[in-house]
Amino acid sequence: MAAALACALAAPLASARAEVSPEAAQTASPRPPGRVESFTPPAPDRVAPTSRGELMNSFAPVVKKAQPAVVNVFASRVERMPANPLFDDPIFRRFFGEGGMPGRNMAQSLGSGVIVDQSGLVVTNNHVIEGMTDVKVALADKREFAAKILLRDPRTDLAVLKLVDGANFPTMELGDSDALEVGDLTLAIGNPFGVGQTVTQGIISALSRTHVGISDYGFFIQTDAAINPGNSGGPLVDMNGRVVGINSAIFSKSGGSVGIGFAIPVNMVKSVIAAAKGGGKQVRRAWMGATLQTLSQEIADGLGLDRPTGALLADVDPKGPSAEAGLKRGDVIISVDGQTADDPEAVGYRLATKPIGGQATLGVLRGGKKIVAQIRLAPAPETPPRDAIRIKGASPFAGATVMNISPAVIEEMSVQGTTNGVVVSEVDDGSYAQQLNLQRGDIILAVNDQKIGTTRDLESVTAGRAYYWKITLARGGQVFTTVIGG
């Protein structure tokens, strides 16, 4: 069987080699006696394949079309170590220089990206440039450009860069990830392990992968095309040379590819690109105003469903779009605009790819009957205003930036478990807050037994000194209380 398959695959190649153009035959036929002439026919121009048979010869035409728009992304930042008066001595500066002084460290990151606009817009993964201040991009033709970060979207693990200077860059067309099917051929292009631009080939091995834990929108394309560290941010390419996904993560116990890679669908990428082109610093997405829950077999049985598919409405905000649409607690969403939604992640993904200002049609099960609901696609309200404040002074919170909690902040920060308190949005390197191990997304509920309702409350409570600090905060839906010395 294997030998037969090998022969079947080799046959088109063999026949292709045996073909001789009419021009070659005409030139080769009238030779003078006793004279031997060599003839090398011109190499034909190679174009994108138009049939499955042509694909058996080579993927080179697809690579030739896509590869110029794939870039390498190099990001770095200087990390300042705790201050030491010795290192501020002019003699040390003379010998080590500002960038090479002891007590400083250069953090670096390496990834890939793809140019999606001739002006120099590059899409990559947020984790490639997260926390970095200096970003450079190298093109396939060896040109290098500095890049500025236009937009970061941690919720999708995507970022958009803009190349500084230059124009008319090579681009790659965006495809349609909803049109993909399991078994479709794909190529992954990137810079694995920093060895240089590399192309690997595989198939779509699964669609709509959820519970992967890569980003808030867990809805991924799975491929067996080899993806390794450094491929992050590079494109997953279809056989028409179009981007269908952004390679983001692998499942591996060794750190290398084992044939299970995950890519962000390009239809999600499109919304991030649109936000960057519109000058936004964040992506505004539709807000349901409801809490969704995964259906278990027991819950499905209790609702009279034959199988546990769909997203259960566990709670509905009385002022949100879901309530306006007539949705109720206990309803089960099974589709969005006619596309099946098997779980909350699928519902979130489908709505996140819809433009703000329109409507979406939800297929809903209620009491064993199917109904249709029209939901308004509106962003989450920012009420109360976030009123971001950077805490100063000598308290354990010094160096932390906090915001008031609103539906918009809950969506942006993925706040879980409570709507009370204030949420930490940023922690300065080397600050007291970092030493306390405060993290982005932590919710401060109380300090020294005083409830924290707003950012001004926290600023007031931490303005002076204290013998001790009793802190209550929530992280990942769990509440912790700790006491540290003042």
Image: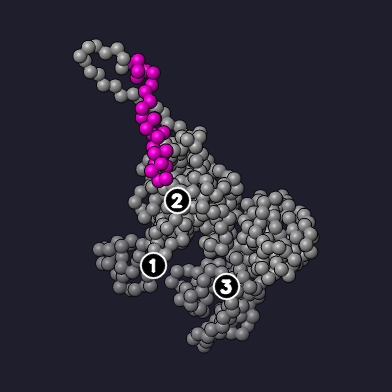
The residue identified by callout 2 is 225
The residue identified by callout 1 is 80
Q: Nearer the viewer, residue 128 or 346?
A: 346
- Asked which secondary structure carries label 3, the reply is loop
Mark earlier in primary sequence (2, 3): 2
Q: In this view, does 357 lie above or below 96?
A: above
Q: What residue type is labelled 1?
A: Arg
Callout 2: 10 Å neighbours few (<14), some, many (20+)? Answer: many
Point 56% across, 63% down: residue: 211
Callout 3: 10 Å neighbours few (<14), some, many (20+)? Answer: few
Taking the image as shown, residue 374 lies to the left or right of residue 157, namely right
- Asked which secondary structure carries label 2, the reply is loop
Magenta stretch prevailing secondary structure: helix
- The label shown at residue 476 is 3
Q: Nearer the viewer, residue 376 or 4?
A: 4
Number of numbered callouts drawn: 3
Q: Can residue 360 be seen in this view?
A: yes
The CA distance from mark 2 to mark 1 is 39 Å
Provide residue 233's location: percent of width, then percent of height: 47, 52
Callout 1: 10 Å neighbours few (<14), some, many (20+)? Answer: some
Magenta segment range?
1-27
Mark 2 vs mark 1: give the one in front. 2
Q: Is residue 484 above or below residue 367?
A: below
Mark earlier in primary sequence (1, 3): 1
The CA distance from mark 1 to mark 3 is 29 Å
Provide residue 53's location: percent of width, then percent of height: 47, 35
User: Which image quarter is the N terminus in?
Assistant: top left
Point 47% across, 56% down: residue: 261
